[in-house]
Image (cartoon, rainbow, N blue to C red):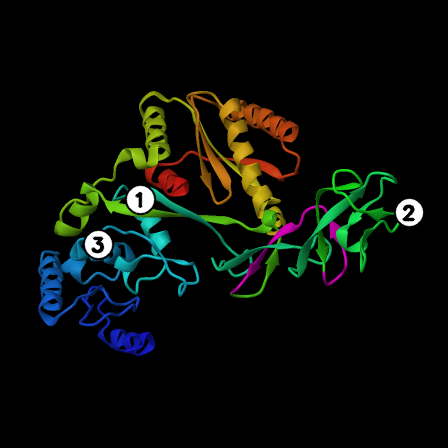
Amino acid sequence: MPDHALRLILNNIKDPLIPIVSFARNESVYIDATEEGERSAWNKIQSICERLEELPPAIRHSVQSEDILLSRMYSRNENLNPVYDSRSQDFIRYPVAGRLENISETATTLFEKGYLLRSFFDRIHVCPQCRSGHLSVREECHACMSANISEEIVVHHFQCAYEAPESRFKTEAGLECPKCARKLRHIGLDYDKPGSITHCNDCGSINDKPSVGFKCINCGTHSRPDQVPARTWYAYNMTAAGLRRILEEREAPAASPDPRSDSFRVLLDYAQREQREFGSLYQLVRVTFANRPQLEAENARLWEQSLLLVIDVLQSTLREVDAFREEDGGFLILMPRTDAAGAHRTMARLAARLEAVLKVELGFSHSLLQASPTRSADERAA
């Protein structure tokens, strides 16, 4: 059965956890497993169904993507492991996730909450236009960006010091210098071949080395290397907290995520409690970069490198008791036991150091977020 037909059937069933096993070899993205023989297939289905029955009704019938993803991992007894798949626009697929969409984003959210652990899988360059992972990396002409290039050996004539591509020396009688018309008979005595050049067969341009370019197979967009962003992919394992989330009744107290998954939130909560108990001041500062959209569109690699330098500057400018985290291309900075004037002075030093270190103008600006009850501040920091 083709994928589109199977998809129509599954859309009518509307159960994202239903097990699907093929009796014959099948590479469909919707099938949980391919088993040889009917007995093996039914054993696989029975195993999945038994684990599905262990889930509380609130989880078994949940429509939240986080619950569905964790439930599929548990019922299939598999980790969330990515595989390369040329049929996917991302070039990466998570088989255990089935038809679930936005899997990487959902898994990242579960990781931040402490329900999943992750490990590096690969870093895939993506098209800046359509975000596809199907890119052709090719050598091309510096001038016209054509891939129709060829390599030519360079000939150096010792006597007159003329140097040019070998094709210019070739005649019916052998090699002859186009400058002085002398015959070139013995390599090492009359001439040598010190290297090669790249010749474009479309525009005729000559260069010592070809350029490198990216062409999207999906939408045809051509990009220079510094314009192509990269996306990091991870494999995920479920934690004990994740297991408790899907196996305990929903009415029970929610499992607390590992505090280490969000140390910034923990520090912010502590600073707020200090303010309530002892009147200690703290400042929560939002740093933004007005030029980020333009820089990211024109040169994604330059923006990524600039962001790394910003982090270095933050670490060297802030105190050891201060904390920061990235948020939407900017940063939230927590400064315990600091008044507003002190925060503004620190931000002025930060701006000066960024101007000295960076070669591009990021459009740095900052604002102090007004202190408020714990829940609201946490929501703003989330």
Residue with the mark numbered 1: 111
Question: Which of the 4 quarters of the picture holds residue 271?
Answer: top left
Residue with the mark numbered 3: 73
Q: Is residue 315 above or below residue 48?
A: above
* First in sequence: mark 2 vs mark 3: 3
Local crowd size for mark 2, using a 10 Å CA cut-off: few (<14), some (14–19), many (≥20)? few
User: Amino acid under label 3?
Assistant: Met
What label does residue 180 carry, if any?
Answer: 2
Mark closer to the observer (1, 2): 2
User: Amino acid under label 1?
Assistant: Phe
Range of residues picked out in magenta: 201-217
Q: How many discs appear?
A: 3
Mark closer to the observer (3, 1): 3
Q: Residue at x 12, y 51 (%)?
A: 249
Q: Residue at x 55, y 35 (%)?
A: 366
Q: CA distance from mark 2 to mark 3?
A: 76 Å
Between 127 and 334, the residue placed more toward the observer is: 127
* First in sequence: mark 3 vs mark 1: 3
x and y, in percent, of residue 338 in the image: 46, 22
